[in-house]
Amino acid sequence: MPKKGTLFVVTGPSGAGKGTVLKRVFSEMDGIYYSVSATTRAPREGETHGVEYLFITREEFLDLIKQDRLLEHAEYVGNFYGTPMDPVDAHLAAGEDVVLEIEIQGALNVKRKRPDAVLVFIAPPSYAELERRLRHRGTEDEATILRRTEAARRECANMDAFHYIVVNDTVDGAVHELKSIVTACRCRRENRGFVLE
Ligand code: 5GP
């Protein structure tokens, strides 16, 4: 029985600290592939094509949709984001876990298309703290911060669709919880590929 990889969908409002928590989890656990999304958003300072995202044009994005090469896609605050399908399936087939860090519409679409996916919501401790973190990051202007704060409220209203909720009060606590979820999924009988001889 081969070991099976799990598809994890990690969602949470901008400012909940998904990126920070995931970076720590990746550095502390082996065997997880981070799916690099395609986006039409402009790179932020320090972001590199092929690392954080594949930064592509709107035309290129529409082409990927036409060719059915995205597992899911969504428009978020004026830009397109999507998950290239082939790398996800290749890594799952190789027995690796795969993490998609995506927004709520995409997460709900993946849940429909891939019922085995495990959905994790990373929540901020409060809306006030979320807004404080968004401002502190200093990468967006006021109008974008307000739009992202509104989007955050809409996303949190859909928390019920998720299997797990990780509250990012402290990064250490959230990392511990997320690692525990991944570990628990790896211990599932059907994922283990374990035969007692
Ligand atoms: P940001 O612009 O801050 O990098 O990302 C904005 C939002 O888009 C975040 O919630 C992020 O998780 C989400 N996102 C990133 N990649 C994808 C993707 O491939 N599909 C979807 N649906 N959302 C994505």
Image (cartoon, helix red, strand yellow):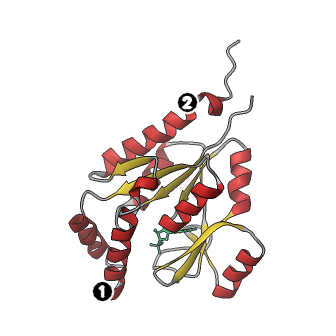
Give the residue at mark 1: 142
- 196 on left or right of 161: right
Query: Which quadrant holds residue 152?
Result: bottom left
Q: Quadrant of the C terminus?
A: top right
- Identity of the residue drawn at 74% across and 80% down: 63
**Looking at the image, can residue 48 be seen?**
yes
- Identity of the residue drawn at 69% across and 34% down: 3
Q: Position of residue 33 (x, y in %)?
A: 61, 52
Seen from this angle, which residue lies furthest left?
128
Above or below for 193 versus 77: above
Q: Quadrant of the N terminus?
A: top right
Q: Amino acid at mark 2?
A: Cys
Query: Which quadrant holds residue 132?
Result: bottom left
Q: Local crowd at mark 2 within 10 Å, few (<14), some, or many (≥20)? A: few
**Looking at the image, can residue 103 be seen?**
no
Q: Nearer the viewer, residue 147 or 46?
A: 147
Give the residue at mark 2: 187
